[in-house]
Structure formats: structure tokens, C-alpha cells
Image (cartoon, helix red, strand yellow):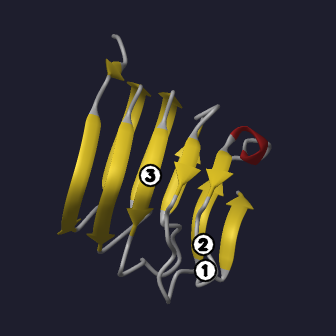
Amino acid sequence: EMPISGVRLTGIVGSGGAGLMARYTDGLELHHVQVNAERGPVFAIENASDLELNGVTARKPVAGSPVLRLTHTPGAVLRNSRAFPGTETFLSVAPGELKSVRLQGNVLDNAKTSTEEH
């Protein structure tokens, strides 16, 4: 009944059928996390407060899905993350939510679309 709080994942490389999913978190931090999934989004995070993403990426992006899908994550920070070749959309958020996501030092030139509201 309460959000999971204070989880920090650092220096992880993983792969699987589905990507990393997190719902109802407070203070979730992902630092230097690379996930390669067969179906996406690679990172799907919903209803998160105080979200910090630093160096998240997917070397093998999923066709037709964003690398990162944020839903109801006001105040999220995305920094030092990278889009690899083949990335269609790196960051996808719900309509009107992009203005509440802080982007710092990301390298998203390889993405066909770096950010979208969808």
C-alpha cells in the first residue's frame, strides 16, 4: 500500500524478454544501468517521485518502442544517458509531462526521435 522507497541500482548490465519495470516508487535511482530487452519499452517507470536516472541505455533498442517510458513521474531527472544507433524514440512521456522532466547532458543524437509526448 506504500511506494517502494530508496532503491538504488548501480553498474548493471542485463537482458531479458521484458525490460525493467517500476511502479509506485519514491527515490528510485538508476546509475549506469544498461538493459537489452526483446520487447519494450526497455525502461517503463510509472508513478515515481524523486526519480533519478543517470547513464541509462539500451545497446539493442526495441523496434517500435521507446528506450524509456515515463508515466506520472513529475520532477524526474534524466542525465548522462545515451541513445545507440537503431534507437527510434529514446524518451516517451504522457502528453504534457515532458516539461516536468529535467534533461541534463544526454547524448541522444542517434535516436530518430529523442523525446516525445505520446
Residue 68 in the image: state x and y as whole percent.
50, 58
Residue 26 in the image: state x and y as whole percent.
42, 23
Tell me the kind of residue under disc 2.
Thr
Contact between labelled residues 2 and 1, with CB atoms less than 8 Å apart: yes
Residue under label 2, please give it: 89
Identify which residue is drawn at 31% across, 24% down: 6
Q: Is residue 40 left or right of residue 16?
A: right
Q: CA distance from mark 1 to mark 2?
A: 6 Å
Q: Which mark is first along the chain, 3 or 1?
A: 3
Q: Secondary structure at mark 2?
A: strand
Residue extending farthest to the bottom is 85
Residue 60 in the image: state x and y as whole percent.
36, 81
Disc 1 vs disc 3: which is toward the camera?
3
Q: Residues within 10 Å of mark 1 (few under 14, many from 20)?
A: many
In the image, residue 26 above or below residue 34: above
Q: Which mark is first along the chain, 2 or 1?
A: 2
Contact between labelled residues 3 and 2, with CB atoms less than 8 Å apart: no
Contact between labelled residues 3 and 1, with CB atoms less than 8 Å apart: no
Q: Dividing the picture into quarters, in which one does residue 97 lie? A: top right
Identify which residue is drawn at 58% across, 72% down: 107
In the image, residue 39 above or below residue 8: below
Residue under label 3, please give it: 54
Disc 1 vs disc 2: which is toward the camera?
1
Residue under label 1, please give it: 111
